[in-house]
Image (cartoon, rainbow, N blue to C red):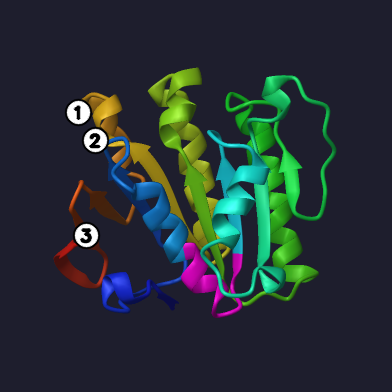
Amino acid sequence: MYDLGPDFDNATLSPGTNVLVSGPPMSGKRRLAMEILAHGSEQNEGVIVVTTRDSASRVLNDYEALVSDPESVDIGIVDCVTKHQGRSVRDTDVVKYASSPEDMTGIGIKFSEFVEEFHRARDVDGVRVLVDSLSTLLMYSDVQTVFRFMHVFTSRIENADALGLHVIESTAHDDETMNTLKQLFDGIVSVEDDSVTTTLPGIDTAQAER
């Protein structure tokens, strides 16, 4: 089981669960999702971040600020930004690069490589996954393409017994797009300026002040 931490009264989610983290810009949804990942790192779980908005170095800096022992963190980052900006980079143990947020095949391959490594080479018990964000994917591809990709991606998370957190800008998309994508997820965390509302499997709907 995956413990979500004190912000969620230490509620737990089953392995293979995928959660949509939704909210307007500047609402703190990315930080909330990162805090859930960091809570896993404190319990020696692995972390995989697929970033379509920020470079891997920024993600790593932000993440390490949330954990007590950055040196001990098992993290893998799929960076979809750096190559897209025209910079020449090579994959490392920590970062694998997709060519752009439009390169969904590449994103899926790099993600699968990390999942394989975590289970085989790193002997990690439990992996938390963050996709930040679906809104960027939707800037480069239509909703049906993103839906098909995320259908496969969330299935991979389920098959790996991981926990998936997927961030989206709630105000950037119409209701039809949001409702289409919501079908892919087992639960939703809605972040507003001063509150968090959760609809999660096995957990009563809850609202908490932030």
Residue 183, placed above or below residue 86: below
Q: Earlier in the sequence, mark 1 or mark 3?
A: 1
Q: Secondary structure at mark 1?
A: helix
Quadrant placement of the N terminus: bottom left
**Residue beneath label 1, please?**
175
**Residue type marked 2:** Asn
Boundaries of the magenta span: 37-46
> Residue at label 2?
179
Residue at 58% x, 28% y is 101
Q: Nearer the viewer, residue 131 or 25?
A: 25
Determine whether label 1 and label 2 are within 8 Å by CB.
yes
Q: Does residue 166 appear to the left or right of 171 in the view shown?
A: right
Q: Is residue 187 left or right of residue 103?
A: left
Between residues 56 and 110, which one lies in front from this camera angle?
56
Q: SS for tag 2?
A: helix
Q: Which mark is residue 198?
A: 3
Can residue 141 be seen?
no
> Does the CB distance between marks 1 and 3 fall below 8 Å?
no
Q: Nearer the viewer, mark 2 or mark 3?
A: 3
* Residue 30 spot, x, y in % from top left: 41, 48
| Real-space Cα separation, disc 1 to disc 2, in angstroms | 6 Å
Residue count near mark 2 (Cα–Cα under 10 Å), binned few <14, some 14–19, many ≥20: few
Q: Which secondary structure, mark 3? A: strand
Residue 106 pos. (x, y %): 69, 34
Report if residue 194 is visible in the image: yes
Identity, as a three-letter code, of the amino acid under mark 3: Thr
Frontmost of labels 1 and 3 is: 3
Q: Nearer the viewer, residue 172 or 17?
A: 172
Q: Measuring 82% from the left and 43% from the top, which residue is drawn there?
A: 91
Residue 209 x %, y %: 17, 62
